[in-house]
Structure formats: structure tokens, C-alpha cells
Image (cartoon, grey):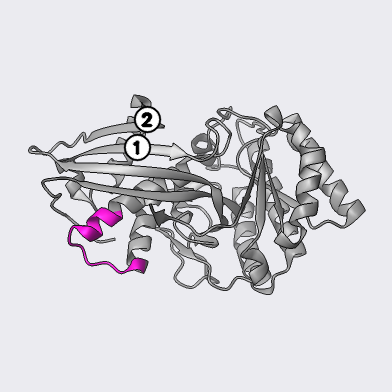
């Protein structure tokens, strides 16, 4: 990615973007180098679970390599968020040297509940990256819309790996894979050949357990180094990416659901066989999975699940059966959620300017 240096207008620059979270179907678990995935991943872009970010940038008279940053969440100043933003700026400053010559004020809001167990890093870092690239483009850097998205995805990856995928609508791939043309370890790309059934696919997030995880994803990724099953897992992911490309092209919902569930359980199997080993399931996680299997077997309902690195369950289903599945969720799955809370979401259109 080329370096761009811009001059911030004397009056400053203000811009706002929204960006959604995403849910990986083929998971990446394990990193190498600086935010490089050990295997390619594919995610569905969500719609309702998103971050709205407003960025105000003013020029500074003196360069400051420690950066001038302030962050507000829902209007409340959050000094504990600043180190993460500064770390992000440190990672991208060689591509955006203007960051040492300005002050940045960030106001952010998540549409999903705080401490809900839904990671805001993907939505937050992608929204901030879109703000930065929008500023570069409007301060003289010649970029097409596609180049803008690629650059924003490149930046977002250096803040949060999964954030690279939230830029794009519908579905995105991050990580080099022979079956996906132009795929890269450095940024995500949009998945082009997707059957219409997946354009309106639903993801209801069961908030089984709110709050911070007992083991962070950063630690979890690091435990894949020296993991006894890492090589087999990475090969499995390569194979599943190939399978998923064909599945999503054909619109095979049953095969999609089976692969999503297998990937989710494999992710947690890697955690349970790491050294040190750990479990992020909660008792109600297992119960929800078993109820989904039972409903599918007894009623033939096309309802499936996937999991992130946590206790919450993502319930996946096509729009054609949304009414039946949502009734099932309300009656049988919501009692397993903390405070009965769940979020009805579906495939969305990626980042956009507010």
C-alpha cells in the first residue's frame, strides 16, 4: 500500500461513517507477522450491529509521534480507549504520515448493547478507517471507490483483523486463497458470486453471556503457535473455503449450515486443546445448540448456528423461514439469553458515509 501524505485544511476536517460487524463462517484463528492471518476466512456482513463514528481532525503546529487523540463513546470521554487508537495509528503511520501532524477527536456509538459480547473492534476499526481514507481522498489523493475500500480494509486490518471484512457488503474474504481471485493477506475483498438466498440471510445473535471474555481473542490467536493440531486446522480451513465458494454460488443452504456449524465447533475445539486449554462456552451455549439441532431434526426447519470466540450463539436461517425461526427463538431460545436479550440481524450493505 502506497504512502500518502496530506495537508489537513486549516479549518479542520469532519467526517462520519457507519460500519457493521460481521460473522465469520470460515474462521481465522492464528496470526503471523503483523496482523497476517494463518488461514483465509469468509464472513457475512451484518446490518443492525454497527458502529457510527464521527471524526474531527485539526492540523497541529508541531509534529507529535505520540499522536494527539481523544475518544468519546456515547458522549462520554473514554481515556482507556486511547491506547488502542494510538497503537493503530503507530501501525499505519508509515502509510499515513500526516497522523503525526494533527489532532484527532473521535466520537463513536454502537447500535448494539455495551458489553453484549459482540466485538465492536470489527465495526469500530472499519468505520474509523473509512473516515481516514475519506479524508485522504478529499484532501487531494486520487482514489476510485474500489481503491478507497481496499485502502480502508488495509488500514482496518491493522487495527483488528476481522475489521478488514466489514468494509464490504454481503460477504467478504480476507486472506490469500487460490479459489478467490485477487484475495490477499493484506486486505479483504468482496465475494462476487453469491446466490440470491444469501442476500437476505438472517443472523439472530443470542446474548447468552454479556461482558468481557475470560480469555481474549488476542491471547487465543497466540495459543495457535505450537498448537498440536494447528497444521491440520489450517488445511481444513483451506478446504472449507473452497467448499464454501461452491456452496454460496449454488445457494445450498443445508450445506452452508453444516459447514458453518462444523467451523464453529472446530474453533472452540482449538481452544479446548490449546496449552493452556480453556473453554468459552457457557452452559446455555450448549443448550441452545442442542435445541437448534432438535428443531431442525423434528420440524425440518432450516436453522443453523455459528459461534465467535465467546459464549454467544449466532442463529443462521434464510429469509423464507424467518417467521418460523423467529417464533422458535422467542419461545425456546430467548429464555437461555441473559435478560432474555437477543438481536435480530441479517446480511447488510457494508460501510457507508453518514
Nearer to the camera, 254 or 195: 195
Label 2 to label 1: alpha-carbon separation:
7 Å
Residue 266, given in percent of the width and then of the height, sits at 68, 48
Residue 65, given in percent of the width and then of the height, sits at 18, 37
- Among the two numbered marks 2 and 1 on one chain, the one whose residue lies closer to the N terminus: 2
Residue at position x 61%, y 65% from top? 199
Quarter occupied by residue 209: top right
Residue at position x 64%, y 73% from top? 249
Give the labeled residue for mark 2. Answer: 75
Nearer to the camera, 82 or 28: 82
Q: Do the CB atoms of the residues marked 2 and 1 lie less than 8 Å apart?
A: yes
User: How many callouts does the rendering have?
Assistant: 2
Quarter occupied by residue 319: bottom right
Determine whether, in the image, residue 1 is placed left or right of residue 113. left
Residue 244, given in percent of the width and then of the height, sits at 65, 65
Nearer to the camera, 111 or 336: 111
Within 10 Å of disc 1 (Cα), the crowding (few <14, some 14-19, many 20+) is many
Give the labeled residue for mark 1. Answer: 107
Nearer to the camera, 54 or 23: 54
Work out whether residue 28 can be spotted. Answer: no
Amino acid at each position: 500500500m502506497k504512502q500518502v501524505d496530506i495537508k489537513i485544511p486549516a479549518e479542520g476536517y469532519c467526517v462520519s461513517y457507519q460500519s457493521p460487524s460481521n460473522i465469520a463462517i470460515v474462521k481465522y484463528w492464528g496470526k503471523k507477522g503483523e496482523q497476517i492471518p494463518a488461514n483465509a476466512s469468509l464472513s457475512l456482513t451484518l446490518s443492525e450491529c454497527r458502529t457510527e463514528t464521527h471524526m474531527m481532525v485539526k492540523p497541529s503546529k508541531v509534529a507529535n509521534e505520540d499522536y494527539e487523540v481523544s475518544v468519546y463513546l456515547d458522549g462520554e470521554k473514554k481515556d482507556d480507549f486511547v491506547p488502542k487508537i494510538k497503537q493503530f495509528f503507530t501501525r499505519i503511520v508509515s502509510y499515513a504520515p500526516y497522523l503525526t501532524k494533527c489532532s484527532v477527536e473521535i466520537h463513536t456509538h454502537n447500535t448494539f448493547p455495551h458489553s453484549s459480547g459482540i466485538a465492536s473492534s470489527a465495526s469500530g476499526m472499519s468505520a474509523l478507517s473509512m473516515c481516514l481514507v475519506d479524508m485522504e481522498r478529499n484532501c487531494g489523493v486520487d482514489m476510485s471507490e474500489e481503491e478507497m475500500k481496499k485502502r480502508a480494509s488495509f488500514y482496518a486490518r491493522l487495527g483488528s483483523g476481522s475489521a478488514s471484512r466489514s468494509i464490504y457488503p454481503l460477504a467478504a474474504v480476507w486472506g490469500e486463497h487460490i479459489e478467490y481471485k485477487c484475495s490477499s493477506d493484506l486486505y479483504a475483498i468482496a465475494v462476487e458470486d453469491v446466490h440470491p438466498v444469501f442476500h437476505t440471510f438472517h443472523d439472530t445473535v443470542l446474548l447468552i453471556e454479556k461482558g468481557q471474555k475470560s480469555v481474549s481473542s488476542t491471547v487465543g490467536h497466540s495459543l495457535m503457535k505450537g498448537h498440536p493440531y494447528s497444521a491440520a486446522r489450517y488445511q481444513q480451513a483451506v478446504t472449507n473455503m473452497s467448499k464454501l465458494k461452491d456452496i454460496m454460488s449454488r445457494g445450498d443452504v443445508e450445506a452452508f449450515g453444516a459447514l458453518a456449524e462444523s467451523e464453529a465447533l472446530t474453533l472452540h475445539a482449538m481452544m479446548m486443546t490449546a496449552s493452556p486449554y480453556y473453554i468459552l462456552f457457557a452452559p446455555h451455549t450448549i443448550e441452545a445448540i442442542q435445541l437448534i439441532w432438535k428443531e431442525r431434526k423434528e420440524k425440518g426447519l432450516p436453522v443453523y448456528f455459528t459461534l465467535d470466540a465467546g459464549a454467544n450463539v449466532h442463529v443462521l436461517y434464510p429469509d423464507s423461514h424467518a417467521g418460523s425461526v423467529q417464533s422458535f427463538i422467542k419461545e425456546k431460545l430467548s429464555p437461555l439469553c441473559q435478560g432474555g436479550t437477543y438481536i435480530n440481524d441479517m446480511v447488510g450493505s457494508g460501510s457507508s458515509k453518514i
